[in-house]
Amino acid sequence: MLAFFVIIPLLIAVSLFVFSNNHTARVLAIVFQSLFVLFSFYLFLSSYRQEVTTRIGAFDDFLGIHLRAYNTSAILILLTTLIFLAVAIYSFHETTSRTFWFLLFILETTLIGLFLTRDLFNLFVLVEVGTIIITMLLMYDKKKRNMYHGMVFIMINVVAMLFYLWGLGYLYSMVGAFDMAVVAQRVAIIEPRQLVLPYSLMLTALAFKCSLIPMFSFTPKTNLYDAAPSAVAAILSGVQIKTSVYLFFRIQEVFGDFAAHNFFLILAVASSLFAVFMAITQSNIKMILAYHTISQVGLIMIGLSSGGEYSMLGGLYHIIAHGIFKSALFLTAGVIYRTYGTRDVYKIRGVMKRMPWVGVAMLFAVLGIMGAPLFIGFTSKYLIAYDVPGWVNVATIVISLGTIISFIKYSGMLFGTWEGGVDYGVKEDTWRLAPSVFLGVLCLLGGVFGVFMVNYLFYGSVYIGFAGYLEKSGIFFASFLVGYVIYKKVVVGNAHLKNISGISFNFKQVCVSIGVLFGCLLAVTGFFS
């Protein structure tokens, strides 16, 4: 069964490459993708309490290719297929380019393959293929700026993944296998000092892919979001970066007790704080969302690295939450700047009046990422902060405050009067509107039924009492008031913040940062002792 999860989107991609100019072909692609979502839900039910595995090739033991679906990977596959369905519907009138539609579904094949494969070398191949496809999606309209950022993106990723390949080669020389289950068994009996080099090499690459290198890795990645079509940006933020987080912790599990969780916890806090500060300085709506992708991934890493049950479940649920509200934000942003002809958050006003359904979807997504009571981000952020160390709890409050400040600015687009022309309603394209509203509604439902969803999806036993809910709600509203004051008194019209917003790093500096992270990992894991 698992092989079909790779084959189905591949067949859709090939069909669309041939018939993408045909209206009926795109309709059928959306119908098949809808059925694929149902198929993914069936996989989730099948793997809820036990693994589903498939061996490809008539080989004994671990020599063949093994596909494995378990609870978490099945949930991520379901999230992936759902967001790709939303993007496909959104793009129905956006483009008839057969290259776009072909690459879109080939990328889905690649991402699902990453969630299913148990082979460490296959991971490398699929990550590289995914990087090439994303770069092509960014560059397919052949704008000079997109071409430049795409080339920078692919060169940096080649450098980073070379670290993974070197580490994998070193590890293979010690264990003689690529299968994760076999490697984990053999690593457990190896002298820890021998694992320092392969671990540091492989985790350096994956930490970079997760944007856990403060400062230097941000600008190339966020510039990509600004250059990308909204549909592609929604996939980059909603799904693609989650594969890196997933792989990061899969590799951590392979190395077992040797993993340097505390080091990455500190790095996640630093990355999230820096990213949320950079988001506050931006005025371009896509750049605001891009930096918040980094900050929210930092929160996910905090939850998954802290070691507590509630925090871990919160981190897992925040993967789903972020995929939903960030996809909704990027899709609504695409409709907004297409209508207004600008991406300047200070020049766009009256969205709620001109496009009420888009405004409602955007508002629900904003409340979700803010972590407002009754919305999806509230549940995940509450659980993440539940049993983290005290200093990390303070950091999560600061991160949430920064998120609130930047989205108070972002929400200004909903209200007021647009000064660029006649302020009247705009006819909304149903194909673009439907997925945005659907994802916005999920932001609400995912919060109202948040505890139930966490316990059901991850068979957890979390509980949020009335007192705890009230306390967290009080922190949110107090943060909102403080954030509003800071926004009005400090952020609006601040020339210094405007200057900071343009911080940029070149290819050489990014490569140096990768080397610095590698050196830090070597030091933390005892290579120099």
Image (cartoon, helix red, strand yellow):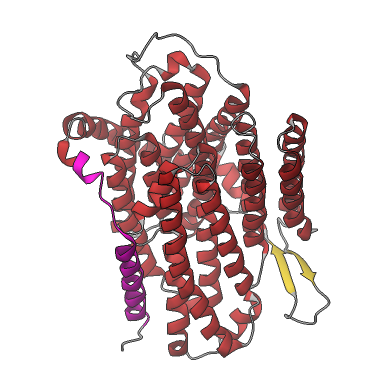
From this view, report whether residue 457 is shown above or below residue 431. below
Report the side of 5 relative to 354 (left or right). right
Report the side of 380 relative to 64 (left or right). left
Residue 293, position in %: x, y? 42, 47
Report the side of 450 relative to 301 (left or right). right
Residue in front for this viewpoint, 386 or 299? 299
Whether 507 is among the magenta residues is: yes
From this view, report whether residue 189 is shown above or below residue 390. below
Q: Residue at x 31, y 30 (%)?
A: 409
From this view, report whether residue 91 is shown above or below residue 514. above
Image quarter (top left, top right, bottom left or bottom right) of the N terminus = bottom right
Residue 276, position in %: x, y? 32, 46
- Seen as rendered, the residue at the extreme right is 58
Residue 52, position in %: x, y? 75, 62
Residue 261, position in %: x, y? 41, 69
Magenta stretch secondary structure, dominant? helix
Residue in front for this viewpoint, 523 or 260? 523
Q: Residue at x 56, y 63 (%)?
A: 127
Report the side of 476 relative to 153 (left or right). left
Bounds of the magenta segment:
498-525
Residue 456, can we see it? Answer: no
Whether 354 is among the magenta residues is: no
